Image (spheres, grey):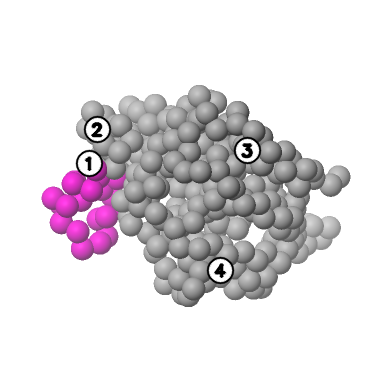
């Protein structure tokens, strides 16, 4: 059984404007993710990538088609979600440690164990010395790492990530990618990561789903045969450039 399976998922939005009525965003999206697999969804801005994640998470309903997570409907699954705008999903009056603990407070986990788990993830991403800082005191990169730690601390069935590094500069983004892979490698969580950055998608993923312009269709699936653990030197390797060029050819968006 696949950890995530989508079959012919379509999404239309009702619009007040008659010319835009029944705006079609997703067009027969089918994909599978094996347990522990890291999948990147790559496509242009506005093509429907965020809508896809919302449907997988059960935040929105598809117009047709089916979504199963470990054979269950999204409402019955435990889904971790790292949003693009992480500031809106965190509590500024809580510390870094307290924000990670928040993910476990609705579960039957003792305060002692919540702190232990939160401190473990802070240590994994090198933020232990910042654990007692309030969220608003942290840098952008630190804030995003706290959001990622919280998602992993929740111990979800699957993890969804919506362009979490899009607001960061190049060097910070590369550092965040390495920190993410460090935590992911330990937990082996099935992950779907949305990106519009080719280098990011290739560097992180086991395979990349390439979307067309809206309404999004699957233009192709590219297997990433780079070895793990991933290292920054790979970004200039012949194998990386070969895969990158293949993605560029596939993702030449029609006008």
Q: Main secondary structure of the magenta part?
A: helix
Characterize the local packing of mark 2: few (<14), some (14-19) or many (20 or more) Cα atoms within 10 angstroms: some
Residue 147 visible? The answer is: no
Q: Earlier in the sequence, mark 4 or mark 1?
A: 4
Q: Which of marks 2 and 3 is in front?
A: 3
Q: Is 85 or 249 nearer to us in this picture?
A: 249
Report helix, strand or loop for mark 4: strand
Residue matched to label 3: 239
Q: In terms of secondary structure, where does tag 2 sit?
A: helix
Count of labels in the image: 4
Q: How far apart are marks 4 and 1 (CA)?
A: 33 Å
Magenta-span inclusion, residue 111 = yes
In the visual, does 112 lie left or right of 212?
left
Identify the mark at residue 128; answer none if there is no mark: 2
Of the image marks 2 and 3, the number of the one nearer the N terminus: 2
The residues bearing labels 1 and 2 have C-alpha atoms spaced at a distance of 7 Å
At x 35%, y 52%, the residue is 187
- The residue at 37%/59% (across/down) is 156
- Residue 4 against residue 141 in the figure, above or below: below
Res. 18 mark: none
Asked if the residue under mark 3 is in contact with the one under mark 4, i.e. CB atoms within 8 Å, the reply is no
Q: Distance between the residues labelled 3 and 1?
A: 37 Å
Q: Does the CB distance between marks 4 and 1 fall below 8 Å?
A: no
Quarter in which the C terminus is drawn: top right
Residue 62 lies in quadrant: bottom right
Foreground: disc 4 or disc 3: 3
Find disc 4 in the rendering and name its residue: 5
Determine which of the numbered discs, if any, sits on residue 119 in the image. 1
Magenta range: 100-120
């Amino acid at each position: 059984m696949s950890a995530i399976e989508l079959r012919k998922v379509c999404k239309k939005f009702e619009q007040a404007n008659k010319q835009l009525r029944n705006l079609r965003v997703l067009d027969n999206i089918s994909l599978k993710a094996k347990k522990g697999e890291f999948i990147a969804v790559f496509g242009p801005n506005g093509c429907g990538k965020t809508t896809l994640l919302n449907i997988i998470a059960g935040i929105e309903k598809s117009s047709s088609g089916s979504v199963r997570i470990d054979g269950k409907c999204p409402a019955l699954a435990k889904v971790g979600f790292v949003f693009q705008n992480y500031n809106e999903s965190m509590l500024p009056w809580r510390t870094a440690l307290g924000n990670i603990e928040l993910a476990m407070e609705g579960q039957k986990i003792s305060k002692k164990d919540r702190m232990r788990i939160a401190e473990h993830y802070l240590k994994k991403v090198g933020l232990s010395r910042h654990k007692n800082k309030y969220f608003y005191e942290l840098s952008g990169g630190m804030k995003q790492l706290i959001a990622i730690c919280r998602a992993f601390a929740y111990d979800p069935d699957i993890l969804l990530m919506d362009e979490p590094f899009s607001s960061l500069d190049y060097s910070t983004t590369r550092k965040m990618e390495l920190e993410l892979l460090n935590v992911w490698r330990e937990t082996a969580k099935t992950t779907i990561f949305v990106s519009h950055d080719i280098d990011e998608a290739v560097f992180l993923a086991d395979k990349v789903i390439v979307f067309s312009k809206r309404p999004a269709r699957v233009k192709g699936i590219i297997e990433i045969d780079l070895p793990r653990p991933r290292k920054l030197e790979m970004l200039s390797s012949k194998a990386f450039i070969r895969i990158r060029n293949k993605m560029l050819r596939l993702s030449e968006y029609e006008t």
